[in-house]
Structures are given as C-alpha cells and as structure tokens.
Amino acid sequence: MMLAFVILLGCASAPERIASSAAEIRTLAASSRDRFEAVGDSAGAAEQGEIDELAASIGVDAAGVRPTTPAWMSTVELALYVALAIAAVVIMLQTGIGTAIRRVLGWIPQRKRSAAKLLRESLDDPTKLREAVAAARTADPLLSAAWRS
C-alpha cells in the first residue's frame, strides 16, 4: 500500500512528460544531424533541423498545457491518506506510545479512574479489598479466568 502511495504521488504531470520527451527528441535530432553532416547528407541534416525546431515548439507549447487530476485519482489519494493515518494510529497504540500520549494529555478513561480510586481506598480500609478484587476480576475476563484456575 505504501508503494502505491509513493507511486501515485511521484508521478510526473502530463506537461512535464511532454516537455521531457520533446527534450529527448531534440537531443536525438541533434545527434542525427551531426551524423548526417559527417557523411555529407545535407537533406538529412536539414530534416533533422526541422525535427529539432518542431520538438522545441512542442516543449514551449507544453508549458501551456494545464494538468488535470482524474476524479478517481483524488479518491485513491484520499483513501491512501486515510489508510496512512489509520496505520499511524494502530502503530502508536500497539507500541505503547498511545498510552504515553494519553498520560501526558491527562486523558484517563472513567473506568480506570474509578478502579484506581477503589484500590486507593482499599489500602486505607482493608474491608474494601474484596470490592477491589471483584472489580478487577469483572473488568478483565482473563484475570478472572486466571483467578479461578
């Protein structure tokens, strides 16, 4: 998916491709003209000169071409941006960076706050220890299964 993202964003526009091709044609025409002149074929050299001039005018005209993006390409580009954002969020959550960011921002879910409050109270009042254990087992099914085994 990332390869498709790079390819779509790295593509040259139509005017750039036209100008590049015109420059290559001019280079080839100049090389051919030199060879025609070396063998003494003035008609071939003149023809290559005309090709060179036409390619030069194509290069100039290419500057006036307005590149357009197809509607489907905009949609694909938007989908790739969304996929990239989702991948970044998943990576942050899987590596633990998301937890660190939530801690720095002070965003702690209400369930975690109430569980922490219950545990704090159980340290002060041992009778609430049973409630804290029950709440922890209720919140985490794996802990509850491990507790029973």
Image (tube, helix red, strand yellow):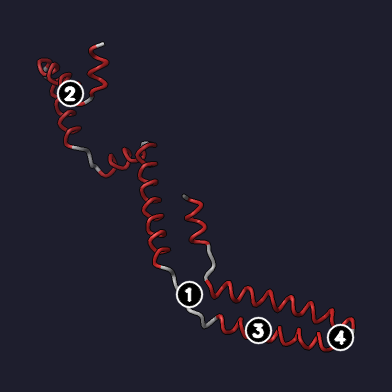
Q: Which residue position holds label 3?
A: 56
Quarter of the C terminus within the rendering? top left
| Mark 3 or 4, nearer chain start | 4
- Residue lying farthest to the top in this orientation: 149
50 versus 91 height, above or below: below
Q: What's the residue type where badge 3 is placed?
A: Ala
**Numbered disc in front, either 2 or 1:** 1
Circles 4 and 1 in contact, beta carbons < 8 Å: no
Q: Residue at the spot x=23%, y=25% of the render?
A: 140
Residue 28 vs residue 95, the one in the foreground: 28
Looking at the rendered structure, which numbered label has been put on residue 126?
none
Q: CA distance from mark 4 to mark 1?
A: 41 Å
| Mark 4 or 1, nearer chain start | 4
Residue 85 vs residue 14, the one in the foreground: 14
**Numbered disc in front, either 4 or 1:** 4
76 versus 68 height, above or below: above
Q: Residue 18's quadrant in the figure? A: bottom right
- Rate crowding at label 2 as few (under 14), some (14 to 19) or many (20 or more) other CA atoms within 10 Å: few
Q: CA distance from mark 3 to mark 4?
A: 23 Å
Q: What's the residue type where badge 2 is placed?
A: Thr
Looking at the rendered structure, which numbered label has been put on residue 67?
1
Q: Residue at the spot x=41%, y=59% of the render?
A: 76
